[in-house]
Image (cartoon, rainbow, N blue to C red):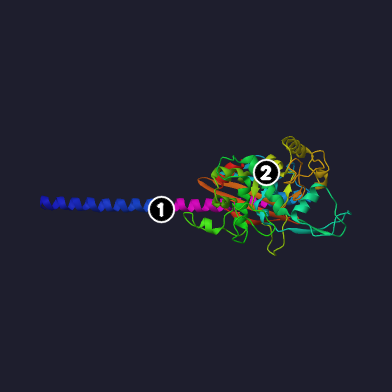
Amino acid sequence: MPKQQKGIALITAMIITSIAVSLAGMIMYRQQIQIRLSSNIGHFEQAYLYSNGMEDWAGTILEKSFEDHPDYDSVADDWYSESGITLPITGGIMQGKLYDLQARINLNSLNRSKKQITASLSSTNTNKSMTEEEYVDNLTKNIEVEKGKDIYVYPAEITRQRLINLMTLEVDPDQEMGPPENFTDVLKDWIDDDQDNGNKEKGGDGSGNGAESPYYQTQEPAYYSADTELISLTELRLLKEMKEDIYKKLAKNTTTLPIVDKTNKALETPININTAEKPVLLAIGLTPDKADELIELVKETPFEKINDFLESSIVSNVLKTESNPDGDIDPDQLDVKSNFFYLEGRVEINNTRIFINSILERKNGKVSVIMRDFSNPQSITKAIN
């Protein structure tokens, strides 16, 4: 065979060998990817099951707490932990923590309608229908109303004042959002079902600094106001003049619980004074000293009835309202038990990580999940912790 032909044959053989080696390497690489993908899917399925188990654990411990004492919840209960729980699992760890969402101010309560109650006490009060100002004034003066006569409670106004107090305590006025009243009007406009800028509904006293869809349509990108109750705290980032620092401070002490159930029945979400932290206690009207006293007291001896709290030395006979800022507290929308809780969890198995964020409702002692997502709550966690 001529030398030239021998060279061509050698080159051909080398090319074929290179192709074969490349194909073999590609096949092995794809196999490794498939093996890794199968492993990741298996680990993800395991992590998902562990996260479901975390919800079951939370439900079990909350139901057990209800069996032990159905009338109150406190930081002394087994479900409560300041640092959460970390458990080793095969190939990784599982972390979880329960929060009492009724230890915070429910932002959706700013959109609650007035509620009618029938008094059971005797008094010299007139029979005329009471306006909001008259109700607050009578409550401040501790005037009893005539037996059998209807009066109205205004939870939205009470929530508004507490949010104003919270904003005053937590937010620097130089952060360009203006007076605290501006925030409450902007939030009210976001969740109400009208386009009446400034919360100027009948009987209201909006400042005119709110914002409806026409304002948000001027933003880039443009969007509409929700005109329904908040689903997530992250919606606050969409509000007029909202800053990240303000959002993080609000996220520590507020929540977005539903105010009606599936049957359109009103849900009560009063603040649990046994689990509320200091900023919330200050927002409802306690002084710093009284708030510290309460926090230490409930660690050992939680209040079992709200009247026990109202009759304690922590609370005076003077009730706090907008017209009486030197009083102690407005007792409406306060309680010693909770129905809504938040589970924040994380599961890691090898290189797989899954987060779980669930809102749990306890009704008649039984716990169910009413909301769940698997997003990374890092920004919320930083704000909370």
Whether the residues at callouts 2 and 1 have beta carbons within 8 Å, the answer is no
Find out whether residue 57 is within the magenta segment: yes
Q: Quadrant of residue 97?
A: top right
Mark nearest the camera among 2 and 1 is 2
- Percent across and percent down for residue 214 are 53, 59
Residue 129 vs 337, above or below: the answer is below
Amino acid type, label 1: Gln
Disc 2 crowd rating (10 Å Cα; few below 14, some 14-19, many 20+) is many
Q: Which label belongs to residue 165?
A: 2
What residue is pinned by disc 1? 31
Amino acid type, label 2: Asn
Find out whether residue 43 is within the magenta segment: yes
- Percent across and percent down for residue 204 are 68, 56
Residue 92 vs 31, above or below: the answer is above
The residue drawn where x is 14% and y is 51% is 6
Q: Is residue 332 visible?
A: yes
Q: For this view, does 109 lie left or right of residue 136?
A: left
Q: Earlier in the sequence, mark 2 or mark 1?
A: 1
Please state which of residues 326 and 288 is positioned toward the viewer in this rendering: 326
Residue 31 vs 176, above or below: the answer is below
How far apart marks 2 and 1 lie (CA) works out to: 61 Å
Please state which of residues 63 and 337 is positioned toward the viewer in this rendering: 337
The residue drawn where x is 68% and y is 50% is 160
Q: Is residue 230 visible?
A: no
Question: Callout 2: helix, strand or loop?
Answer: helix
Q: Which label belongs to residue 220?
A: none
Query: Which segment is the magenta one?
Result: 33-58
Please state which of residues 270 and 88 is positioned toward the viewer in this rendering: 270
Considering the image in quadrants, where does the C terminus appear? top right
